[in-house]
Amino acid sequence: MAGPGWTSWRPLALARGLSSSALAEQLDGGQSFRWVEHAPGEWTGVFGRHVARLRASGGTVEWSGLAGDVATEPALLNYLDAAGEQERLADGLPWRSDPVLRAAMAVHPGLRILRQDPSEALLCFLCSSNKRIQQIRSMVAALSRGFGPPLGAGHTALPSWADLARAQEKELRACALGYRAAYVRGVALRLASSPDWADGWSRLETPALLERLRSLPGVGPKVAACVALFGFARLECFPVDTWIVQALASAYGLGGWDAARMEMFGRVHFGPAAGLAQQHLFAAARAGRLPGLSDGGARAPRPRSRARRRR
DNA sequence: ATGGACCCTTGAT
DNA sequence: ATCAAGGGTCCA
């Protein structure tokens, strides 16, 4: 079937300007793994049950969607935080007193946290361990093609947990998931019978939510923080990955700290929008634009394990 | 509480 | 061809 085709490009009513580079960083900077740059500066992606195209020019974001889906625009507005709920949080970050953060935020001004579907964040970050962004994107694309419902124009939504529970681990491994196949299947078996799992979990306080997430197979502290941040809009969460470890070690003098201590540092130092600070630091570090990271190779010093936890 | 193994892909020697 | 490492987690 020919499919409904794309609507014409129209401006999206964002409360803030967004540069092309900040848009690219939001869509392809490790928050979501569902967007592809189909032409220079133009992105095609699937979020929830919607397909959209996005581009930015002169600070304005324009969008196009599948012609039968009138819900795409409101979904996009939510996804991109059009109302600007993160503006006040961003301004409240300690950039005035923290030159490292200030420099990081200057790399992609306007960069914000996407408001993703909880299941989408959970599935994608289950796949993320020991993988690069490009590889994660191909894994979730394979899962969608293999097990997800078609949306039109050749795109498919991510499979539901019930969809995934019907798949054998062998079939999941065929999507290049490796040992993550057992994680995905394990979570699918746990959640398949409660399609509205996220509604209940979203009412939990963040510490309880993190604990609940970590009870799922394959979800440790880092993935739990990512799911809470990107899937449940818990902006205070501070995922600590290898990039953040390096950034905090080199730019904040925290060499030798373990991830748990760094997470504590991040939440205390950056406050209620620590996750937003994390995303700026992550992006700046990957761009080689953090002090101490540009001087030859992104290689972390061997973590020393002398640092003791205290409480 | 620290050390490895884990599946698989990619990029660097 | 081999090696190392990748937005970690699990189990000794």
Image (cartoon, coloured by chain):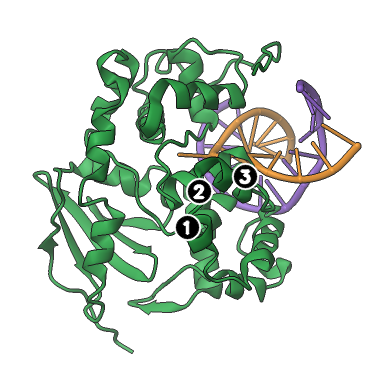
Chain colours: A green, B purple, C orange
Q: Residue at x 62, y 58 (%)?
A: A176
Which disc number belongs to residue A211?
3
Compared to residue A100, the image places residue A224 above or below, namely below
Of A189 and A34, the residue lying toward us: A189
Q: Residue at x 23, y 35 (%)?
A: A88
- Image coords of residue A17 (percent x, y): 14, 43
Q: Are marks 1 and 2 on the same chain?
A: yes
Q: Which residue is mark 2?
A: A227
Q: Are marks 1 and 2 in contact (CB under 8 Å)?
A: yes
Label 1 is placed on what type of residue?
Pro
Of A172 and A306, the residue lying toward us: A306
Q: Which residue is mark 1?
A: A118
In the rendered image, which quarter contains the C terminus of chain A? top right
Which disc number belongs to residue A16?
none
Label 3 is placed on what type of residue?
Glu
- Image coords of residue A231 (percent x, y): 45, 52
In the rendered image, which quarter contains the N terminus of chain A? bottom left
Q: Earlier in the sequence, mark 1 or mark 2?
A: 1
Compared to residue A109, the image places residue A140 above or below, namely below
Most extreme residue toward the left is: A58
Relative placement, left or right, of A205 versus A151 is right
- Image coords of residue A229 (percent x, y): 44, 44
- Decide: few, some or many residues near mark 2? Use Cα within 10 Å; few <14, some 14-19, many ≥20: many
Of A272 and A81, the residue lying toward us: A272
The span from disc 1 to disc 2 (Cα, nearest Å) is: 7 Å
Q: Secondary structure at mark 3?
A: helix
The span from disc 1 to disc 3 (Cα, nearest Å) is: 15 Å
Say whether residue A174 is visible: no
